[in-house]
Amino acid sequence: MTKKRYFIPLSSLNLNGVFASESVSPHSFYEKRMFGMPYNTLTDDSGTLIQTENSVVVFSDYFDFSPSSGCAIFIGIYEDDLDPTFLVKDKETNIAYYFKSIYLRKGNFFVLFPNDDEKYLFIAMATPSTEVKTLNKYNVKYAFGNNKETDILYSLPKQPNLKKRTNFPILNLILDNNGVFFDKAFNHIKGFIYGFLCGSLGQKTDDEIELERTFQELHNLITGIKGKIEITQSFNLNDYDEFKNELGKSNSLFKLVFPNQQNFGYDNITVRLEELIKLQEKRFAELSRQKRHVEGLDKEEVKSIQKQIDELERRLYSIRGKEYELRERKKYLEENRPKRPKANSPEKAERERIDTEIEEIKSEISDLKPEKSDLEQQISYLRMDLQKFVTLGRTDFDNSVEEQYFRIAGYITDLSFWVSQNLSENKKGASYPQIDNVKFDIVKLTNHWQNPSNNYLDFIALFSSSSIDDLNDFDLSLYKLCTNILLSHSKTDENNLNAKATDLAIYLLDNFTKSELSKTENGLNVIRNLNNLIDYRSSRTSDYNFPDNQILISFICTIFKPNSIDEFTNLIHSNKVSCLDIAYSFWATFNGFANLPKNLTDIVLENGNEELLIYIDNYLFDNYLKNKNHTQHCIGKSGCEVLI
């Protein structure tokens, strides 16, 4: 039996947000919950609105319409995957209204484009986007093939005329914001799950962490050496010793981590470094020669050279002026001499006189050329002498030195990228921790976001997994406390993140001080560090040292670097954070799943482990989305009364 399908009209500009958040939402949800892409103001060809603010309007078939921006597409979904409690049907038009977000998972939706060109354009634009992370999860990478069993992106069937809609009854139903804040709560819980699993699969050994750290240190050292030499204008072979030592350390770690990989990239850096040192020696030898040369010359010599140039230029100017006058006189005579005069006529005599004068002018011009050329050459030589005083500090080796610095930095970047990619590749197919006993109270979290409170709330129902169970009691309690704080104060407005970091530190300190944790020795250390952090952020102290506790340092790195996963990763690596599952669960909880970049989630979504993806979806749908009814009372203009 064919399953009942519904079609959701959508602007193609909103499709990136669909694959970033794995959901389609009522229009009013986007701005309130602050994630997703609200480019979905839709009208039919007559300009009639075909959406409501508080529901997703679904149709029994596709039709012609024109979004205000982007091209017209449809999301196809199956009625069996919709919660009937939230579905209001209009039997007269066969249109339905769905009063919550539609969460997507593999097998329960497809996308219709008006033509193949628009489909391919979307893929081309979406693939490089860091936020559009789920394309391969839904086999979109096969969209260019003919395998329609795995291709969720179809073009509309070819037919002369698409169906048109002329009557769209708008049910102006009134409901509260429960669904909006349920979305927000689910987004941040989902962020925790993906962050925890990404960190678990990306867990690195001490050698792997230290190897990645050496690349940042090598960048810092080579940049520091370059800056020091430029500022001091002095060079010593010992300047490069620290860089050489760090390079040797990095090479040794590389061999431990990748024992079967030959000396990848390090030889290139060594060769360039030796060439750089040779060039620096030559450059500073030339600078020294320049300095001795200039110091040996009298300043009066500069004045004398300039005076000679000025005098020669005046003479050259005079000669050029005379030459110009002669040429103009010659030109005038040629233009005004008589044309073919008769023999023995006055015109004939005048022509001969003019021809004689022209020849004299030619001879005079010819006589001027050697003197003119000699003056130009003298001036040129004098200018070259003068230039020696102007170019002090520049040598023929400067560009080559810059090129060697550039190449060394490039090789370090290539090495860092290769190591990062291959460490991630080695994790593919690795076992992952079970998360069945990690559960959150989504109703409680939804209510908190609907009615925010500064009171500390515990949203954790169960908190057990293989790596979590390895934590001692203190760290486990601190992990729960930090997770709850990030869930209740997650990212909402990027304009106040700097101030929010201090507020979160204060909030953690206040609630930590009230807990039993504060009475232990470890607890006193946490309190001291948080007080020092708050003083540092408030400019009351100039120094701050990151703590030793892995939980606390992960929390602090999250609130310091919430906007960039790369900056966050560099910060936790520089502080030798080894519990990556905890660190990334914090960062992903604060940002929410929709805002996670693919360079974090690829280790899960690009893992090639179909079982893992199914496991995550089953966990999320079974624990948070299945039969999660929220009692809301809605009254429509049509008079229908619906209990949602």
Image (cartoon, rainbow, N blue to C red):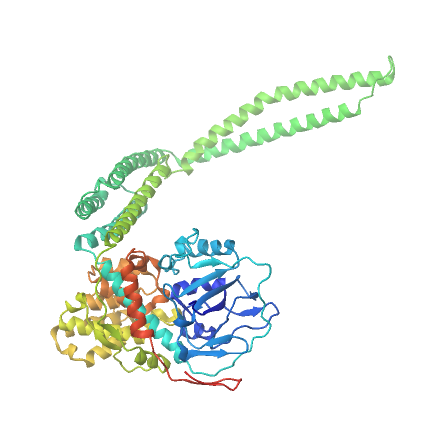
Q: Quadrant of the C terminus?
A: bottom left
* Residue at position x 52%, y 75% in the image: 94
Is any atom of residue 499 visible in this view?
no
* Residue at position x 33%, y 75% in the image: 626
| x and y percentages locating residue 529 in the rendered image | 20, 70
* Depicted 460 relative to depicted 191: above or below: below
Q: Nearer the viewer, residue 226 or 275?
A: 275
Q: How many marks?
A: 0
| x and y percentages locating residue 89 in the rendered image | 48, 78
Q: Nearer the viewer, residue 61 or 408?
A: 61
Task: Indicate left or right for 379 with 78 as reference.
Answer: right
Task: Indicate left or right for 366 with 308 as reference.
Answer: right
Q: Quadrant of the N terminus?
A: bottom left
Q: Nearer the viewer, residue 498 or 593?
A: 593
Q: Residue 30: which quarter of the image? A: bottom left
Q: Residue 175: which quarter of the image? A: bottom left
| x and y percentages locating residue 153 in the rendered image | 44, 58
